[in-house]
Image (tube, helix red, strand yellow):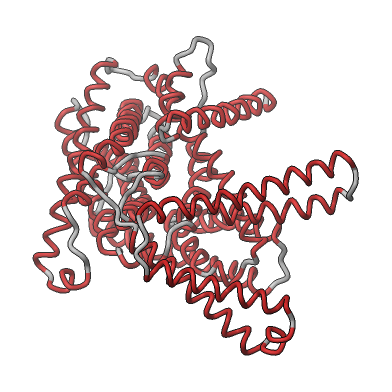
Amino acid sequence: MIQENLLLILSLLFIIAMLTMLSNRLRISYPIFLVIAGLGISLIPGTPHISISPDIVFLLFLPPLLYSAAWNTAWKEFWKYKRPISMLAFGLVIFTSATVAILAHAIIPDFPLALGFLLGGIISPPDAIAATSVLQGLKVPKRVTTILEGESLVNDASSLIVFRFALAAILTSQFHFWDATKTFFVVGFMGIAVGIGIAIVVYILHRFFPTTAVIDAAITLITPYIMYITAEHFHWSGVLAVVAGGLFLSYRSQEIFTYESRMSILSLWETLTFLLNGFVFILIGLELPVITAGLEGYSVPEAITYGIIISIATILIRIIWVFPGTYIPRMLFKKIRQTEPYPGWKSVFLVAWSGMRGVVSLASALAIPLALPGGESFPHRNLILFIAFIVILVTLVLQGLSLSPLIRWLGIEVDEEPEKVQQLAMRIRLAESVLAFLDTNYADETKNHETYKRVRDRYERMIEVAKKRLATEESDEEKTNFLPHYRQMLLDIVDVRRRELNHYRHTGEYNEELIREREWELDLEEARLRN
């Protein structure tokens, strides 16, 4: 019954919200906590078995999660580190798939090489959401986070292409290397073309048609699904279509959205990605006992052994690839030495260790068909699923939980001073542009009217304070305590006004609509102060 399924889904979403609050209290990244919690819930007697169609996982979850990740990626930073991102997103995926294929073929009895490539394609891509969520709140160099997020965006496409080639080889018993290579590039290029083409149409809609904040948010929600479904309809890369289109529109978002649209879209996507991410990660834990029960021809200890061996190999493969991939091109090419700063081994090791698997690996594993074209069962399907789940668990929990102590042990420090200098410099230039505008367009008003003059004086003081902070040598205590204390005073003032509005609401002294308008203004002011 749909009511029973709906109740189960809503109950899971409520549990996700509760567990996320608990993970925040325990200071554990919520993807890690949800996977462990899902596994624990599944072991409770009477817990209903949850199964989900692989098509639903790909179609429902993948487009919005990838689009959100692309939207939050800075294009200039992404392009700046395109070489290391490409080395990881394409080179490492293929290297991992091949190495896992050979290893699985060697250690698992009667496990063909084609199945090994299928397994390799499933577990080769680190997850964008896992990397972002686990690194959130940790002081990590900007270069590291940009490379990890950029890699996780693009490697989904390359791993899914490997997965599909391996699956096609198993189903048809045919594989032609050169044809597969040509198809790889065609599928990727056409996926990007579809994504950018649809993004241009959406750009025109937002830019030149009379949309509202609600319409903008609705179109933004629909867009990744259109990109993904269109590309997949022609058997091109839906993942690259969503990523390319998301990056295109994100780069031009300031041109096409009003402040109301941006706020609506931000709130919508934060809520949606939180629910989808939570559902997928708790599903990983809930599904494992179901997969374990379906193992045929293998004992659970045997399957766990295979899973742990391949998990360790996956971690080592990444380390083995990242260090030579970082330093050998620098030794061979002078241009790289001139244009890219020298990466210290600590940051390189952090990139190598941050290989958490997640939603794409889960979706790929579940997408393995139940039977071959002849009707016989797909060989080793449940074992492949089990190994994939073990790899997700091991990388997400082991590597995710160890990142914070690893950063402390390595002594990685982020120099925040250049960013502070940039913030002050930007504040000065923005204020100076305002003064120039006022002097050109409102010169008489600023001289003759006190209200206009106060606005101009405000920006003059802003420039004066910012320049003083840049030029003078303040004590560390003054730098540390003044601004937080001043900001807290402004937040307290907002709170006083909010309590007064609440008093007006209870007394009925003012119109409710007028009170809501003032609350909206206070919300905007508090958001500015807190961010």
Relative to 201, is 288 on the left or the right?
A: left
**Compared with residue 146, is residue 340 higher up or lower down, i.e. above or below?**
below
Residue 3: x percent and y percent? 69, 25
Q: Residue at x 55, y 76 (%)?
A: 460
Q: Residue at x 49, y 60 (%)?
A: 246
Residue 429: x percent and y percent? 48, 76
**Compared with residue 76, is residue 17 higher up or lower down, i.e. above or below?**
above
* Whether residue 186 can be seen here: no
Report the number of numbered marks: 0
Residue 303 picture quarter? top left
Q: Outermost residue toward the top?
A: 45
Q: Nearer the viewer, residue 81 or 167?
A: 81
Residue 90 picture quarter? bottom left
Relative to 146, is 341 on the left or the right?
A: left
Q: Nearer the viewer, residue 158 or 276?
A: 276
* Whether residue 58 can be seen here: yes
Relative to 196, is 226 on the left or the right?
A: right
Q: Nearer the viewer, residue 111 or 411?
A: 411
Q: Residue at x 24, y 46 (%)?
A: 350
Relative to 392, is 4 on the left or the right?
A: right
Residue 502: x percent and y percent? 78, 42
**Compared with residue 422, is residue 322 higher up or lower down, i.e. above or below?**
above
Residue 26: x percent and y percent? 43, 28
Q: Residue at x 53, y 49 (%)?
A: 64
Q: In which quadrant of the rendered image does the N terminus lie? A: top right
